[in-house]
Image (tube, rainbow, N blue to C red):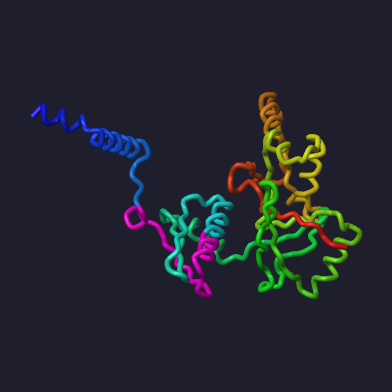
Amino acid sequence: MFETLKSIFSDRRMQVLLVIVLVSILHIYLSGVKFGIDFAGGTRIPIVLERSVNNAEMDMVVNVLKERLSKFGLKEVKVKSLGDRDLYVEVSGSDTESIAEVERLIATQGVFQAVVDGKVAISGDELIKKSIYTVPFDRVSGNADYEVAFTITPEAGPKFANAVLGKADYPLYMYLDRPSKSMIVLTREEMLTYAGGASPEQALEAIDNATRLDDYPEQHLKVVLADDFANMLAANATIPVSGPGSRVQSPESSVSRPETQDSRPQS
């Protein structure tokens, strides 16, 4: 019998299988068994789209929902598609507040703002819905430019014209679900990587200009370099963040960056 076992475990395939089994057991021991809502309990929220969509469009809808829910700190939420019109959101547990928050976020339209020089030039309700579409991106020397096209309502025209008057070379920053009472934390290296040769002071000034809202100072996003942040913590100093309930945003997380698109208003 010993010889039989020895011959079995000397087989390379058996050795690999044994390693896989041991790793699986160790993973279960360390992380525990994760059951679905059928066993652990939870809520499944069905969603039916207005029309049938193809696979690419369905993937986009699922990803948008996942990103939208994760931005608001809802981590234990799963979004899955079913066919070409149906999908559902699974919320683990039975916390009524979390379920209500998920339902609210699903039913609420994203808040869109287009900002020029600290002024809101376009709001989401001023867009013609059927005019919104993405433009195929172009790759140049390994870089990619992403564009989105839309048309604003006739009533919004004068407002936009006044906002961009004399500012043809100013960027138009577009935000979706822009966070408020928040602070963007990034390292000096991360900032200078995308600074295009600008100095740290110039880069910080550019970020500050891109994130400020003159009409809504409470929504201004304070920018702090992680290097300076660590030094201030070591010195027991404090970093002021306007308003109660402020939260720190890290550029490495899904809630860190307001979704922006930089374009230039035309004169």
Q: Position of residue 241 (x, y in %)?
A: 71, 41
Residue 47 magenta-drawn? yes
The quadrant holding residue 39 is bottom left
The quadrant holding residue 16 is top left
Taking 94 as reference, is 256 left or right? right
Q: Nearer the viewer, residue 159 or 167?
A: 167
Q: Position of residue 216 (x, y in %)?
A: 77, 54
Residue that lies at the very extreme toward the top in this rendered image:
235
Q: Which residues are magenta?
A: 36-62
Where's the N terminus, which quadrant? top left
Q: Nearer the viewer, residue 230 or 48?
A: 48
Taking 248 as reference, is 107 left or right? left
Against 57, is 7 above or below? above
Q: Nearer the viewer, residue 76 or 181?
A: 76
Taking 168 as reference, is 217 left or right? left
Where's the C terminus, which quadrant? bottom right
Q: Position of residue 224 (x, y in %)?
A: 72, 37
